[in-house]
Image: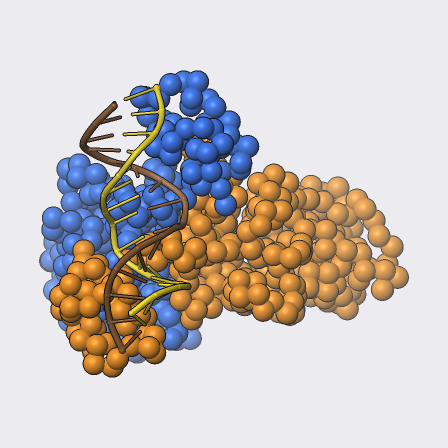
Chain colours: A orange, B blue, C brown, D yellow
DNA sequence: GTGAAAGCGCTAACAT
DNA sequence: ATGTTAGCGCTTTCAC
């Protein structure tokens, strides 16, 4: 591997000059620069970013802490889409991404903070980590600049991006109410996700706005997965046959609920309306196609990356970004027959 | 940020001793080691992997060159699953992954080789790159250890992992033949993927084995996408109404073909049998559910990572790994009515 | 406009 | 068992 030292020798100049020439400084003679560039090409030189990082104390990398690159959780393409958004923004800014092994099958010995500090990432984007994860709080409270996705925390060096979950859930339930439904069940996610609380709040808001009394038995928790949604729906529909509509806090759970309805011989949407949340790819492929609340996952990643880079350049105007959601009416909801 | 120098000062030893103590060398007094570990913890020390990489000339990172983290190509979860497999294997071996910006929207100025050399990745895994990509050949011919996924090239420092595409395609077509189909069309991928050639070969083999004459007009190319599959199927079925079965080189194209069949009022599987390739998530959610050739994407990534680490440790027994595929019979294929 | 020298944080001979 | 020293490849004062 050739170094600037080699170039310096061949070009007959000092390493300082080589460094400056290659980095485009203005105080170097154009002839010298040309010569140096030429020699660099000749020797097939590649700058050593590691050496540079060491002296500059910046690695030009941003860490990615996602739980979900496991075999199981591939079903919602949520992560990939967010990643695509991050990648898109970051690639314009000459940063690379390092993917941390959050979900090692081996016993995890290092905390997220350690991971970040050892690799000397300039910042980190965190997604899909449960709020009861102790490592999460450690990294948030550390001095590492971080952006949280769907976790509403802020401070000097932490920003977050999320969608308006309260309003999103409200839209979903309002849509059901508009269709004449009164007995509306909710299948929420687990309690260790902020979005769960928020979507529950939206559910309550909508009912209240329509003067429909809240029946707490109508709300059950799943785990955001298809299987858990199916189980929850089954339990709910069996014990409360008067329910004519279901709002699910994720599309995957909604799809599970559709399965439960099928088992119970409840036609969707004739006998049971279902609205999901997320608008994952699957939503428009299942039949009936799922009515859902769309959130722009790509944008979530894109804006998250933007917030982080703002943080890194100290030009952070805001530490918080809330994106809009949209109701996508498809085939799984219908007028109530009651 | 505290350094081993700080630790050395506080503990009253030299930096060498600190280094050796922290790295678990045996030639250090246990009392000294205890003292040093203690001070390290006290000072909240994190080793600087960048400094270490510089001197060790190993970065303990492996690069990931995938084309497909774009907004559009999120549909098949192929990439994520492979990634999950890579991540799983690599995490057991204390390597981190760096994701390169292959598909920058900005004009790409650096070749893959440059990307890898600058970051000093120890090796690279390449996936989803078209065979006509000039950068691909450059990196393969470079001295960077690399593993190719679904690109059958080998040399001293390049291995590859793939599935048995010839046999896979053969199984698919054989299944159709077994069901009495004679006029079997094929929607292949584009010519810049090795798998396309191989699957075509499998198609031909199966026909030949059944003494069915090859009609080259029955084979058309798509782009592996749903839209292209739809278009290709439409053209094929319109110009050759005698076709009763379709073998598609990807599930996405098969789903597109199902759309085309619907438009043409051809019932699947009653009037038209369709078999796909990949077994992506969508395959079991569309209706009718898609009969397809399953390939284990997770394993593809897992074994790819293994091959790379073998390469890096010079213990590479083999540079080639071919995984088996499996026919998954679902609802999109049926006996021919002819 | 260019160079000499110091130093980023670490490891690894080579002493002792 | 521990310390001294050099050096990985680069950037950056500071001097000329």
User: Looking at the image, which is closer to me, A9 or B303?
Assistant: A9
The quarter of the picture where residue A328 lies is bottom right
- Quadrant in the picture for the N terminus of chain A: bottom left
Residue drawn 65% across the image and 67% down it: A318
The extreme bottom residue here reads A30
In which quadrant of the rendered image does the C terminus of chain A lie? Answer: bottom right
The answer, for residue A9, to whether it is visible in the render is yes
Task: From this view, report whether residue B306 is shown above or below residue A201.
Answer: above
B315, above or below A182, in the image: above
In the rendered image, residue A255, in percent from the top left (x then y), is placed at 57, 53
For residue A92, above or below residue A276 = below
x 64%, y 53%: residue: A151
Tell me: residue B154, above or below residue B224: above
Q: Report the front residue among A316 and A22.
A: A22
Compare residues B131 and B92 and report the one nearer the observer: B92
Q: Based on the displayed image, in which of its 4 quarters is residue A277 positioned?
A: bottom right
State the image coordinates of residue A227 (x, y, percent, origin top left): 56, 44
Q: Is residue B27 left or right of residue B146?
A: right
């Amino acid at each position: 591997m050739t170094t600037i030292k080699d170039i310096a020798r061949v070009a007959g100049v000092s390493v300082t000059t080589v460094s400056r020439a290659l980095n485009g400084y203005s105080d170097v003679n154009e002839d010298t620069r040309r010569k140096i560039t030429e020699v660099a090409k000749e020797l097939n030189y590649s700058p050593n970013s590691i050496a540079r990082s060491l002296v500059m104390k910046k690695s030009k990398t941003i860490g990615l802490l996602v739980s979900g690159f496991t075999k199981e959780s591939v079903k919602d393409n949520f992560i990939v889409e967010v990643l695509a958004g991050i990648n898109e923004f970051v690639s314009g800014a000459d940063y690379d991404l390092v993917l941390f092994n959050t979900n090692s099958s081996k016993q995890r010995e290092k905390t997220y903070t350690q991971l970040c500090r050892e690799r000397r990432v300039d910042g980190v984007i965190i997604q899909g980590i449960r709020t009861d994860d102790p490592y999460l709080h450690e990294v948030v409270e550390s001095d590492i600049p971080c952006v949280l996705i769907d976790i509403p925390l802020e401070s000097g060096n932490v920003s977050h991006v999320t969608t308006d979950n309260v309003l999103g859930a409200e839209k979903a339930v309002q849509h059901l109410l508009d269709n004449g439904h009164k007995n509306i069940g909710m299948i929420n996610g687990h309690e260790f996700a902020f979005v769960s609380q928020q979507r529950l709040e939206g559910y309550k808001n909508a009912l209240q706005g329509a003067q429909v009394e809240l029946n707490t038995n109508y709300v059950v928790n799943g785990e955001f997965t298809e299987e858990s949604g199916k189980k929850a729906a089954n339990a709910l529909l069996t014990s409360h046959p008067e329910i004519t509509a279901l709002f699910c806090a994720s599309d995957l759970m909604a799809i599970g609920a559709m399965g439960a309805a099928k088992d119970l011989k409840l036609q969707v949407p004739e006998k049971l309306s279902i609205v999901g949340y997320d608008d994952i790819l699957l939503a428009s492929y299942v039949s009936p196609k799922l009515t859902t609340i769309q959130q722009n996952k790509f944008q979530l990643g894109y804006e998250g990356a933007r917030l982080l880079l703002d943080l890194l350049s100290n030009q952070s105007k805001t530490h918080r970004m809330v994106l809009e959601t949209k109701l996508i009416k498809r085939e799984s909801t219908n007028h109530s027959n009651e």
